[in-house]
Amino acid sequence: MLLTRMLESMKKHFNAATTLYPIPTRNGYQSRWMTTSKRVQDRSKKKRVHDLEVATEKWKITSKIFFLLEILKQEPEMVIPVRSLNQYRRQINLPKPHRISDFLRKTPKLFELYKDHNGVLWCGLTRKGEDLVEEEERVIDNHADKAAEHVTRFLMMSVEKRLPLEKIAHFRRDFGLPMDFRTNWVHNYPHNFRVVKSFDEVEFLELVNWNPNWAMTELEKKVKGIPEITEIPTPGMLSLPFPLKFPASYKRVSSYGKNIQLFQQRPYLSPYADAKGLKAGSLEFDKRAVAVMHELLSFTIEKRLVTDHLTHFRWELVMPQKLMRLLLKHCGIFYVSERGKRFSVFLTEAYEGSELIEKCPLVLWREKLLRLVGYRGRKKKFETFSDDESDVEDDDGLIQSDSEVVNLDVELGQQDTMDYEDPLLDDSEMDVGEITCAYQNLKSS
């Protein structure tokens, strides 16, 4: 009876994510507390970085504007009836009854609205918006050769030296690829790759020529420099430590110092070497997966990717089934942002605060877009934790403009952080609920 009372008392003080399970023993059953929670938040709440959460908010805003720009670019005169945009409510996360016209009026320097003689409301770009679109096309054209190199190296890291074209297309914006990536761009580099079809008519992008100059990781280049062509060795074992940048609120680095040191000293297989012989779950397997993730993130424009897109390359890149667990475990190398339904992973070494250390022309163009949209800082409370579970109130971003449109108060119907899921691939990087962060508190502004 006393034991039962003690257990009931313990239940009240334990986290709701724990459950009492009967464990079989020689003397019958023994009760043991075991966690049942698999939420990413429960495993990472002490490792959050406010600055990278700010970077996530900026990306969420720009991604919605990117989507609308691409819709307009597909129109012959870059104009479209506003009512035709209703079908894209999910992509821009604007639930009814909020009007799309109100959303567009919040960026008067980029979008303009007008009615024709029949009273139909149309949306187009301002002169500044058109100039920005033309500038983007020039920047992407200049970036094409570097993007082709990254796509080729992506294929070189894969098991079969080919990847489904549809999956690569989800990294289009991240790699700085043009809108016609699948129809035209992939055919512009026949010496690097080609499009092939499987027996069930699935399109793959297949490596044509192995380039030994590109079989050297970005980390090797930083540490050793770019060698002469004759000096490039065959990809094999590497022993280079990964740059580490732990969250400021994560105070357990010293207690795990020995494990971190052992991890850094452990040799690992190059992402470009044959990994078929590695045993899943082994230390060598996991560290090679870290190297693959590090390399792939290094290819991206913003050194950031959507995690659910990555999970669909587990087999092709020989990565563990529980990839999210690996990313969270190595919080000094990667940072997982949980804001919204679609999580993002950052390469921590590439950021100083919320800003990229090295900005390519495409990043500079995106920053120019944000300025035109009217992105600026605003006080917002991020759920950031230290070891003592204290909350921190910091700055966030908001789309603001001089528009006279009022009463666009998109309520937070969803939490900022959601349970991690591995949904099917989607044509957009946006999901329902994300637009609210950009327009919260507009009534009072």
Image (cartoon, grey):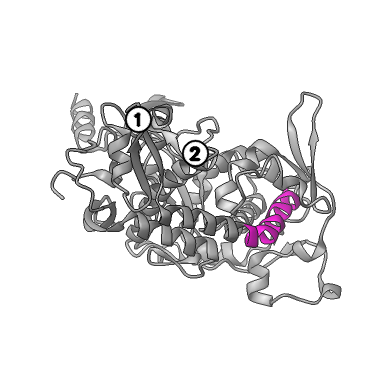
Q: Residue at x 36, y 51 (%)?
A: 57
* Residue 156 belongs to the span the image colors magenta: yes
Camera-nearest label, 2 or 1: 1
Q: Earlier in the sequence, mark 2 or mark 1?
A: 2
Which quadrant of the figure has residue 320? top right
Residue stretch rendered in magenta on the structure: 141-158
Residue under the point 37% across and 54% down: 58
Label 1, residues with CA under 10 Å away: few <14, some 14-19, many ≥20? few
Picture coordinates of residue 347 (x, y %)? Answer: 51, 59
| Apparent side of residue 420 relative to residue 281 in the rendered image (left or right) | left
* 189, 423: nearer the viewer: 189
| Residue 185, horizontal then vertical, whole percent | 70, 47
Report whether residue 276 is seen. Answer: no
- Residue 417 placed where, x, y %? 33, 41
What amino acid is found at the position of numbered circle 1 in the picture?
His
Q: Is residue 177 above or below residue 238?
A: above
Badge 1 element: loop
Q: Main secondary structure of the magenta part?
A: helix
Q: Nearer the viewer, residue 13 or 68?
A: 68
Q: Residue at x 23, y 32 (%)?
A: 11
- To which quarter of the image does residue 420 belong? top left
Position of residue 364 relative to residue 199, above or below, is below
Mark 1, residue position: 117
Q: Is residue 44 left or right of residue 279?
A: left
Q: Residue at 50% across / 31% down in the picture?
A: 423
User: Can residue 45 be seen here?
Assistant: yes
Q: Secondary structure at mark 2?
A: helix
- Dot 2, crowdedness within 10 Å: few (<14), some or many (≥20)? some
| Residue on which the image places disc 2 | 71
Q: Position of residue 137 (x, y in %)?
A: 58, 55
* Left or right for 126, reference 320: left
